[in-house]
Image: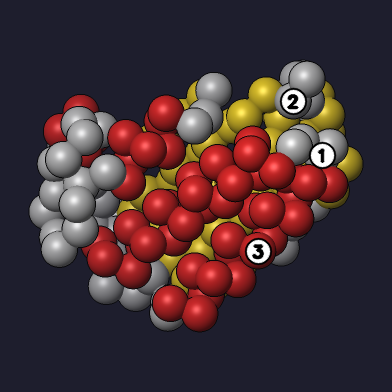
């Protein structure tokens, strides 16, 4: 487990205002890590896509946490979790343009594009997505 320099709080995502809150937290976390405005904007987009997916695809929403970890490698990390129904096909969901809801289908493809490590653990009981962006 990583040693944390700044532990974020779990933020409940159940409305559009929660999406805006997690966007602010992600941006603040990136800037606190010393990243420039462009990279902070990319990290904010990652958080926004994940939070929006929670609203679109999970009946009860979910929660997210943004933080900075020092070990084993310095990174920004976002954890995104929900209580189901799971992602039917992770490989399909990663394809730009694929959607099972009303969006454009760019969510997870965008998350992958702006991250260095993406792990998705999913089942009908819920999903945990862990996204990392290495720090210089």
Residue found 60% across the figure and 71% down from its top: 21
**Cα–Cα span, label 1 and label 3:** 14 Å
Q: Please report whichever mark, 3 or 2, sits nearer to the chain's N-terminal start.
A: 3
Q: Cβ–Cβ below 8 Å for labels 3 and 2?
A: no
Residue matched to label 2 = 135
How far across and how far down the image is residue 82, in percent? 40, 59
Q: Residues within 10 Å of mark 2 (few under 14, many from 20)?
A: some
**Quadrant that contains the N terminus:** top right
How far across and how far down the image is residue 128, in percent? 44, 46
Residue matched to label 1 = 33
Tell me the tag on residue 24: 3
Q: Cβ–Cβ below 8 Å for labels 2 and 1?
A: yes
- 113 or 9, nearer to the observer: 113
Residue 127 horizontal side relative to residue 132, left or right: left
Residue 56 horizontal side relative to residue 70, left or right: left
Tell me the tag on residue 96: none
**Cα–Cα span, label 2 and label 1:** 8 Å
**Cα–Cα span, label 3 and label 2:** 19 Å
């Amino acid at each position: 487990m990583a040693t944390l320099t700044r532990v974020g709080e779990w933020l409940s995502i159940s409305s559009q205002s929660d999406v805006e809150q997690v966007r602010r937290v992600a941006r603040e976390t990136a800037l606190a890590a010393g990243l420039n405005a462009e990279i902070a904007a990319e990290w904010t987009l990652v958080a926004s896509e994940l939070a929006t997916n929670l609203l679109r695809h999970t009946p009860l929403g979910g929660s997210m946490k943004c933080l900075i970890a020092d070990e084993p490698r310095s990174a920004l990390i976002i954890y995104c979790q929900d209580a189901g129904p799971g992602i039917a096909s992770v490989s399909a969901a990663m394809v730009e343009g694929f959607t099972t809801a009303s969006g454009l289908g760019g969510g997870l493809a965008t998350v992958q594009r702006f991250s260095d490590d993406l792990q998705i653990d999913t089942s009908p009981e819920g999903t945990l997505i862990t996204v990392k962006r290495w720090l210089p």
